[in-house]
DNA sequence: GTGGTCTAGACCACA
DNA sequence: GTGGTCTAGACCACA
C-alpha cells in the first residue's frame, strides 16, 4: 500500500481503520486482523501496526484480549464521530472558511462540487 | 510569539508572511524585514528565519538581492493563490466532503457557519 | 575529504552524488548512505549533509521514506541530465563561445584537446 | 542594469569592463568613467564600483592617477587574455568535456552551434 | 537505527 | 548593515 509522506504511517493506518468502523465494515466487538497479518497486507513493519493499535486502544476505540487479539469497542463509532467532529469544528472548518475567503470561493461552488462527490459514491 | 507544536516553526512563519502578502500588507517589490530583526521580533533563532526565507524564495514568492535583503516578488500573490488553490482542491475539499458524509453534516449547516464567520471579520 | 573554497560544501557534495547517479553507481530506488554515516565519511557536520539531501530532494532527484532513509528516484538520471543540459546550453556554451572568440581559439584546438581528454578516461 | 544573482556584482562589472577593453572600446591609457558616474549609470552603490576598480587595479589591468581618475594599463589586453586563457584551460575546458561526455554531446554539434553564434555577431 | 527541526554561535563575502 | 554557510550539539517523532 502507498502512504503519504507527510503524515505518520501509523496514523494513516489508524484513519483507515476508523473509516472502516464508521462504514460498518468492522462491526462492534468484531476482531481485528492480527498485527502481523495486517503488517504483511499493507507492507509495513509490524512495529508500525503495533503503534496504530496502541494508539486506537488509547482512545478506547479498540481493546485487547490477552492471547486473542484486538477487538472493536462497543461504542467505537460514537467515539470516532465525537473525535472527528471536534477536529472538524475546531480546525478544519476555520481553515476552510479562511481559504474560501482568501481564494474567493463561494458556498455555491462548494455545494456544486459536493453534489458531484455524492453522486460518485 | 507562540507557535503550535505540530507544525515546524519555520513553516508557520512562512504561512504568516504569505497571509500578509495576500492581505496587501507586504506590497510587491517591498522589502521584507531582515532575518535578524524578524528573529528578534518573533523570538526564534535567526537560522529558523533564514530557513523560512529560503523556503519562500524557493517557491519564487520572495527573492534576494545581494547585501540588501529579501523582497516580495511581483507575482507573489498569484503564486501563493495558485499554490493554495491546488492544496485546497486536492486535499482539503476531499477531506471536507468525506467528513460531511461520515459525520452527517449538511451543506446548509456549513453555509450557516460561514455566514457567522464572515460577519465576524 | 577536501573541498573547494568557492562553492558551498553542501553543493559540492550534491554534485558528487549526482555524478555517481549518472555513472550508475547509485541505482534507481537504491538507498543512499545515511546522513550521519556520510557526514563521518566526508568529514563534515551532519547538518551539511542534511542540507545536501534536502537540496537533492527538492529537485526530485532523491526522496525520503520515514524512518528508513533517502532513496534515488526512478527518474533521477533523467532529472539530472535535463538540469545539466539546460545549464549547459544557457550558460556554459555562450561563455565558451565568447571566450573562443575573445581569445582566438579555434574549434580545431578544442577538438584536439577533447580527443586527449577522451583517451585519458 | 540587471545583474545575475549568483556572482558578485562587482565581479560582473569587472568582467564587462574587461570585455570592452578586449574589444578596443577602452583603448590603452584611456581614462575610465568615474566611479560616481558609473555607479549612476549601472544603478549600483558607488562602493561596489570602487571595489570593481580596486580589483582591476590589483591585477594591473587599470591604474590610478591621483585626482585624475582610473586609466587603462598599456598591457591591459595582454593581461586580461593571459588570465582568461588560464581560467579557460584549467576550469572551463575540463568542465565542458565532462559535460560533453556525460550528456553525450559531440564536437560536431558544438561546432555547428559555434557557426551560428559567429554569424550573429 | 532513520531523518527533521531548532538553538547558539561563528565567520565570510558583499553592498 | 545584509544574507550564506558551517559547526556543534540537542531533542523529537518515527520505523
Image: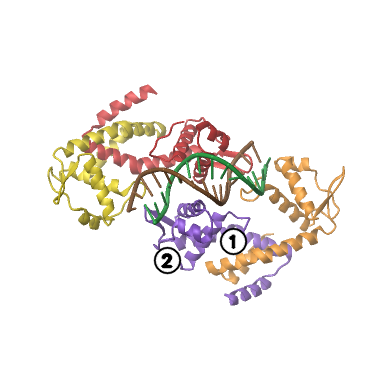
Chain colours: A orange, B purple, C red, D yellow, E brown, F green
Q: What chain letter is assigned to the residue under label 1?
A: B
Q: Which mark is residue B27?
A: 2
Q: How many marks?
A: 2
**Residue beneath the point at 40% across and 63% down:** B30
- Whole-Å distance between the Cαs marked 1 and 2? 26 Å
Circles 1 and 2 in contact, beta carbons < 8 Å:
no
The extreme top residue here reads C119
Q: Could you tell me which residue is drawn at 68 percent across and 72 percent down? A: B109
Residue D93 x %, y %: 32, 32
Q: Is residue B86 above or below residue D7?
A: below
Per the image, the residue denoted by label 1 is B2
Label 1: element kind: loop
Res D79 seen here:
yes
Where residue A38 appears, as percent x and y from the top left, is 76, 43
User: In the picture provided, is D56 more to the left or to the right than A57?
Assistant: left
Instruction: Tell me the residue at 63%/69% (across/down).
Output: A111
Q: Residues within 10 Å of mark 2 (few under 14, many from 20)?
A: some
Q: Reading the chain from its start, which is encountered first: label 1 or label 2?
A: 1
Quadrant of residue C5 in the image? top left
Query: Quarter of the image containing the C terminus of chain D?
Result: top left
Q: Chain of mark 2?
A: B
The answer to whether any part of residue C27 appears in the image is no
Question: Could you tell me which secondary element the residue under label 2 belongs to?
Answer: loop
Residue at the location (60% across, 55% down)?
A: B7
Residue C13: x and y in percent read 47, 36
A107 left or right of D73 in image: right
Residue A113 locus on image (x, y percent): 61, 65
Eye-nearest disc, 1 or 2:
1
Amino acid at each position: 500500500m502507498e502512504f503519504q509522506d507527510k503524515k505518520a504511517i501509523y496514523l494513516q493506518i489508524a484513519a483507515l481503520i476508523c473509516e472502516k468502523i464508521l462504514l460498518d465494515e468492522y462491526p462492534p466487538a468484531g476482531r481485528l486482523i492480527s498485527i502481523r497479518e495486517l503488517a504483511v497486507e499493507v507492507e509495513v513493519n509490524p512495529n508500525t501496526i503495533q503503534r496504530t493499535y496502541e494508539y486506537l486502544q488509547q482512545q478506547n476505540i479498540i481493546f485487547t484480549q490477552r492471547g486473542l487479539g484486538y477487538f472493536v469497542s462497543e461504542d467505537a463509532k460514537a467515539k470516532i464521530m465525537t473525535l472527528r467532529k471536534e477536529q472538524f469544528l475546531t480546525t478544519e472548518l476555520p481553515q476552510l472558511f479562511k481559504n474560501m475567503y482568501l481564494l474567493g470561493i463561494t458556498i455555491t461552488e462548494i455545494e456544486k462540487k459536493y453534489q458531484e462527490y455524492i453522486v460518485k459514491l
